């Protein structure tokens, strides 16, 4: 498979609402493999197809805490939420920026797997946060949209001052919570 270029803040595709997948075929499975390769190369825990410029409802994830959970979701939708969690988030499409984001503590997500079979995932903690973050991408929403207007303005100001907004995420930007 191959590693694809991750689109960065400012690319219009990140604000598009992704189209549903009508049929899970070999092209979708190749995209899933490429998303996994790209996510691993970028040292992330989740990646949505829109982040590589493909505006269809496909995402991948791998969260290792508290146990190793890995997969792909096609046409995912959150059908239930409960509780709250506030944690720091980062994003592969906005390297070097991180901020505390409030999200549901627990979610139930339904969609299709890479074989086109219906799946239902009940997630808490980091997996819950990851799935919500990636589904947001499929809806054209970025994590900076989930913070206060003042924090968003500060983050965007910091982003605009980066000398090279198109470089890969430097080693110094890594933290305990990998970007999604």
Image (cartoon, rainbow, N blue to C red):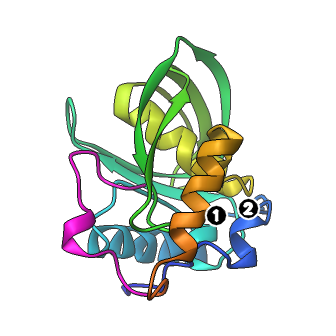
Q: CA distance from mark 2 to mark 1?
A: 7 Å
- Residue at horizontal 28%, vertical 45%? 177
Q: Which mark is residue 21?
A: 2
Provide residue 22's location: percent of width, then percent of height: 78, 62
* Magenta part of the chain: 167-180
Question: Toward the viewer: 131 or 173?
Answer: 173
Q: Which mark is residue 170?
A: none
Identify the element where label 2 is drawn.
loop
Question: Toward the viewer: 36 or 145?
Answer: 145
Q: Which residue is mark 1?
A: 24
Q: Residues within 10 Å of mark 1 (few under 14, many from 20)?
A: some
Q: Is residue 177 magenta?
A: yes
- Residue at horizontal 22%, vertical 35%? 65
Q: Is residue 45 magenta?
A: no
- Residue at horizontal 52%, vertical 16%? 84
SS majority, magenta: loop
């Amino acid at each position: 498979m191959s590693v694809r270029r991750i689109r960065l803040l400012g690319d219009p595709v990140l604000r598009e609402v992704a189209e549903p997948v009508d049929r899970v075929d070999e092209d979708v499975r190749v995209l899933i493999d490429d998303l996994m390769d790209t996510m691993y190369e970028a040292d992330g825990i989740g990646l949505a197809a829109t982040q590589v410029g493909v505006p269809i409802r496909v995402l991948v994830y791998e969260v290792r805490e508290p146990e190793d959970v890995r997969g792909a979701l096609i046409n995912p939708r959150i059908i239930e939420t409960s509780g709250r969690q506030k944690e720091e988030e980062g994003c592969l499409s906005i390297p070097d920026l991180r901020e505390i984001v409030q999200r549901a503590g627990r979610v139930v997500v339904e969609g299709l797997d890479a074989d086109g079979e219906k799946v239902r995932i009940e997630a808490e903690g980091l997996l819950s946060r990851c799935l919500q973050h990636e589904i947001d991408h499929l809806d054209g929403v970025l994590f900076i949209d989930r913070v206060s207007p003042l924090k968003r303005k500060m983050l965007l100001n910091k982003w605009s001052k980066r000398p090279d907004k198109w470089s890969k995420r430097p080693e110094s930007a890594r933290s305990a919570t990998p970007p999604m």
